[in-house]
Amino acid sequence: MKLLITGGAGFIGSAVVRRAVADGHQVVNLDVLAYSANLENVAQVAASPNYAFEQADIADGQALRAIFARHQPDAVMHLAAESHNDRAIDGPLAFVQTNVVGTAVLLETSRAYYNSLSAERRAAFRFHHVSTDEVFGALGEDGAFTEATPYDPNSPYSATKAGADHLVRAWNRTFGLPVVITNCANNYGPYQFPEKLIPTVVVRAMEGKTIPVYGDGRQVRDWLHVDDHAEALLTVLARGRLGETYCIGGDSTRRNIEIIEMLCASLDKFAPANTPHRDKITFVADRPGHDFRYSIDASKLKAELGWEPKIGTPQGMDDTVRWYVENAGWWQGIRDRGFHSERLGLTPA
């Protein structure tokens, strides 16, 4: 199968690209190469005859039409997105442009391409939209998100992702574009840009800096290793029911402070300092619109498609910390380009 993967130089997208090529798929990686994208993330498959790269903006319809015509994909996996909540607070319109307008342009391009295919190829075509659990808003102390949870986004980022989800469903119901949608838990693992929680903790600790914790650190998230997520996404693409949504979780709901303390313990093993790394923890003002709790019920995906997360959180965190320690050149290159884990998202609520 030839897959057109948008955002394939990003964190989750690159994991999907690496896994898809390893599984024998042909992959076209379409990425605009914004600040958090990095072609080093896919260096291990770049020389494969089953891999091609196209630099383009998903909001550029002319460029998309040319790429579809040139590569003739059998499926689209749409992962390109502006994704950092703090940046969405400081600059929300960029998120609207990419996540909403870009998705609409990609859908229209895919629809025109789909309609041009033979009946046999139309029957096999899929558009897989990859989204987030943040579209559902926040949970209280109990419960978990399911595919039936009403949408209630609380931040500019989650609102634009919710908008994209609704557009994908509309193109399915109005125009017959064959789609599947997935909403995932918080991802972690290698190659994550050092602005998100886990790489921020690890990289700042290795640089001898303080480890910032928003609020009291009691926010709850479901943690999903990116390699488990990549496997789930390819499973849904291959066998998911058209028009359906699948929630993907890691069966690992933990408070942020618990994750940070777990990371500090791993750092003490793989990058020991003069004092325990947990001594660097500093509590800072919370982010505006910061949802308290997320948790995913992935029972539909497990029951219908037989997928289960394989990487337990303690082992996954250990492996992630070790990767950042052993691949310091990767994140130091990002530092050299001028990114230093600056605090963003301080716009008043």
Image (cartoon, rainbow, N blue to C red):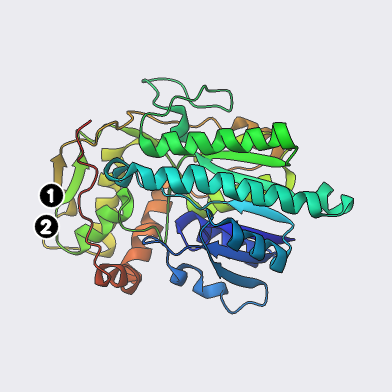
Q: Is residue 177 left or right of residue 8?
A: right
Q: Is residue 205 left or right of residue 81?
A: left
The amino acid on which the numbered mark 2 sits, given as a three-letter code, is Thr
Residue indicated by mark 2: 275
Residue closest to the eye, 31 or 102: 102
Q: Is residue 54 left or right of residue 225?
A: right
Q: Is residue 266 above or below residue 85?
A: below
Residue indicated by mark 1: 279
For the point 30% across and 53% down, which residue is it?
195
Classify the position of the C terminus by image quarter. Answer: top left
Q: Report which quarter residue 324 is drawn in.
A: bottom left
Q: Would residue 295 be visible to someone looking at this image?
A: yes
Residue situated furthest right in the rendering: 119
For the point 15% across and 40% down, which residue is it?
284
Q: Is residue 282 above or below residue 215?
A: below
Q: Is residue 128 above or below residue 303?
A: below
Residue closest to the eye, 224 or 25: 25
Disc 1 element:
helix
Classify the position of the N terminus by image quarter. Answer: bottom right
Q: Would residue 245 be visible to someone looking at this image?
A: no
For the point 53% across and 74% down, which residue is it?
44
Q: Is residue 154 above or below residue 68?
A: above
Q: Position of residue 312 (x, y in %)?
A: 47, 47
Q: Report which quarter residue 307 is drawn in.
A: top right
The amino acid on which the numbered mark 1 sits, given as a three-letter code, is Asp
Measure how far apart labels 2 and 1 are at the Cα level: 7 Å
Q: Are marks 2 and 1 in contact (CB under 8 Å)?
A: yes
